[in-house]
Amino acid sequence: MEGASGLPKGFATGTASGTFVSVEAPKLGKLPIKGTIIQLTNGPTNNWAAVYTSNRFPGAPVIVGRKRLAAGGPLNALVINNKVSNVCSGGDGVADSELVCESVARALNLNEGGGASTVLPSSTGVIGWRLPAKELASDVVPKAVENLDDTSGLDAATAIMTTDRWPKLRSKTLKNGARIVGIAKGAGMIEPNMATMLSYIMTDATIPKARMQQMLSSIANVSYNSMSVDGDESTSDTVVIVGSNHFDDTDETEFEEALTEICKGLAADIVRNGEGTGHVMRVEISNFPGSNLEARRLGRHIVNGPLFKCAVSGNDPNTGRLAGSVGAYMGQYNKDGAVEKMTLSLGGRTIFKDGKFVLEGDDVERELSEHMAGAQYDEHSDYPPHQKFVEIGVDFGSGTGSGAATVLGSDLTGEYVVVNADYRS
Amino acid sequence: MEGASGLPKGFATGTASGTFVSVEAPKLGKLPIKGTIIQLTNGPTNNWAAVYTSNRFPGAPVIVGRKRLAAGGPLNALVINNKVSNVCSGGDGVADSELVCESVARALNLNEGGGASTVLPSSTGVIGWRLPAKELASDVVPKAVENLDDTSGLDAATAIMTTDRWPKLRSKTLKNGARIVGIAKGAGMIEPNMATMLSYIMTDATIPKARMQQMLSSIANVSYNSMSVDGDESTSDTVVIVGSNHFDDTDETEFEEALTEICKGLAADIVRNGEGTGHVMRVEISNFPGSNLEARRLGRHIVNGPLFKCAVSGNDPNTGRLAGSVGAYMGQYNKDGAVEKMTLSLGGRTIFKDGKFVLEGDDVERELSEHMAGAQYDEHSDYPPHQKFVEIGVDFGSGTGSGAATVLGSDLTGEYVVVNADYRS
């Protein structure tokens, strides 16, 4: 264990690289692929939980993972690869994914304790290509197992990156000494078809499986499901939490608060990491006339609107676009919700109330613009990156409703377009 | 009457310019403003209909227009201004809008036949600023009335433009000689806060008011409501049809078909006119497991997804992003709809079926990319602009459902971002 990135007790991670030739794009020649293994070093655990994408065309690893989750069996390891996401390919993606799990079981000698069914797979990368399962199984997995190490989580956080700007790792140590360490790869979208968000949380606290699932599902809604870079859930989005059960005196309330903080932090890191992201917006919705889910949808609508995203990228406090976006959403999806008492704020300053814009003098405009500029990311000088947000408030007014949400999103820059318009090969 | 742009009998249009100083932005100095009047030259008509934005923060002219529509009274004229949209401003926007209508009534001597209540107002421009109603009433409106002319609709089509690339006018002459002429201003979004779509349709056919409203509401769904440039309905979107009742032998079926063609054409023109638009996408959804409205929402989701929009701008046939977008929408909003029989096509070629991507060789990739490049707009050489589309098919398979929609949208280019990120002043 070493500082903030030190792994919880009972975990080791190992990574390795290999190459493969894609069946679908043989002309590209040998392509690099990375494999990462997260091992429970003291044997299998029943205490794990997962939340998967709601996308209707899920990748094969998601299908396999859902099967493991439904079966309720124990886990010994997780295996993650980049480069090929194993989604809707021409071959038998589930069989390919199982083949990789079998190789992990073999390398870790798990075959007497459930074998491949205790290994949880994930893939991220190009959609539609066949997973190079043979290469992963014969070459990458054995090397990754050789490299297993129980010190830092940073290697794994780095290995699962695709085009993320920085590795994403957040951790907390609880009062009883138990650790929670979360890593994530982001939804940078920079590499076409690599829209995947993956996050793995390791803990040595003992939290019963059912409680763990309940916590993760609920926390996922206010963290991973409350951010948007590109508007869509990918075909592979996956969040997994695994416990190695070393601290059975863990306070569940303290654990849940720490887990919430870690997941919210990783979600913010994912948005901030998107290549081409200049600003991270944080929209706080309160007193919404509807459910939290609907409030979250309004938040996603705001942060996904291209006009408003462009205004934010230029530090333009374009309050008209913000009010227009809220009005359009409410007109389409919440016709009867009261909007008469709504106030909008930017950087803490009220910009709209009683159905009208608050008159903006030049000084106020400058102040709002400065708030936005202060939250801007400068690729050339900002390291370590700051954690500032463009703060947007949408309050429907006391008594209007009880829905609430906090949603994060990114601006829209020319860099984003250039990178995402590039031809894939 | 002169050729394709000739006005129907009983109509005249006039335009004029003026200047004003904005209360909210006095430092900008004198700003130009344009006024356009559409007059019914043979007296008032009861046969008119309108469809307004569903945005919950509508502009004052929309509030006034809805009041006129509900009252069911006759119309003598329409008055439209650019530069200030009269939305949610600090003053009394409705009184400002009525003041302009009164000036039109005065200039046209309508005061014995209902006066201002027979004049329908529209405004487009900056949100949140006060309408310069006095300047419009005392200066612009009288000049526009002096300029009234019953020949071409092109002057009015040009005067209502903001940053549209070209004026938008479509017309048809029916078998009995009746004319339908539609003009529109687009949702180019280039000028911040000018998201407004306005369209006015003039006809000398006699169509009873109730039938006219029914046709317009239904046709608006498959034309203006089936396109998206920026994802949102603006605070001012307005479509009006007015009849001067010269041809009472008009075949209603023929009329409805012609009106549909005109409105669909104007909707396509609006998307194509958006500054920064390189391609227009046309998404055809069929056998959708839900209503036409839901099918339309899926279509709008596809054409509004920034990742797919970027791919289209780069002529990248990124089939993964398309399938990912459909899967994400269905997972969020149509969990139980069957997706198993869905096929996707691009440029008429099947790219996805039976839950898998159809293997794409390099030749197919090139063919798909060429289809996209063929529909690209070249600002420097394409005049008159072509009318080609990037054709996308989403067919849920025979027997899955009866929902259908055709939705138009634009790609996402660096030019769009640059223009929309610029500070307003």
Image: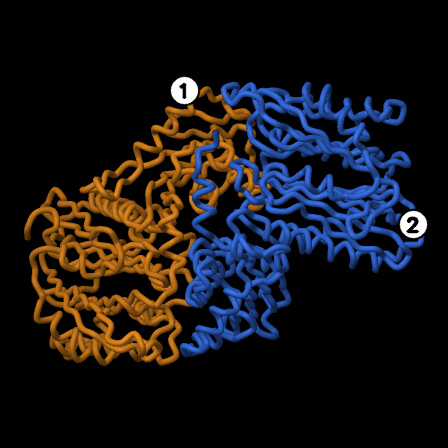
Chain colours: A blue, B orange
Q: Position of residue B114 (x, y in %)?
A: 20, 76
Q: Position of residue A66 (x, y in %)?
A: 72, 35
> Label 1: few (<14), some or many (≥20) within 10 Å?
few
B320 relative to B142, above or below: above
Q: Position of residue A290 (x, y in %)?
A: 59, 62
Q: Position of residue B396 (x, y in %)?
A: 49, 32
A155 relative to A305, above or below: above
Q: Please give left or right for residue B139 compared with residue A204 in the image.
A: left
Q: Nearer the viewer, residue B218 or B195?
A: B195
Please give the label number shown on residue A247: 2
Tell me the quarter of the picture where residue B147 sits: bottom left
Please give the label number shown on residue B363: 1
Task: Identify the subunit bearing mark 1.
Answer: B
Q: Is residue A142 visible?
A: yes
- Residue flagged by tag 2: what amino acid is it? Phe
Does dot 2 land on a helix, a strand or a loop?
A: strand
Task: Identify the subunit bearing mark 2.
Answer: A
Tell me the quadrant of the picture where the C terminus of chain B can be found: bottom left
Q: Nearer the viewer, residue A20 or A205?
A: A20
In percent of the image, x 35 and y 33: which residue is there? B372
- Residue flagged by tag 1: what amino acid is it? Asp
In percent of the image, x 51 and y 70: which residue is there? A344
Does dot 1 land on a helix, a strand or a loop?
A: helix
Number of dots carrying numbers: 2
Q: Nearer the viewer, residue A372 or A283?
A: A372
Give the Cα distance between marks 1 and 2: 59 Å
Q: Is residue B219 visible?
A: no
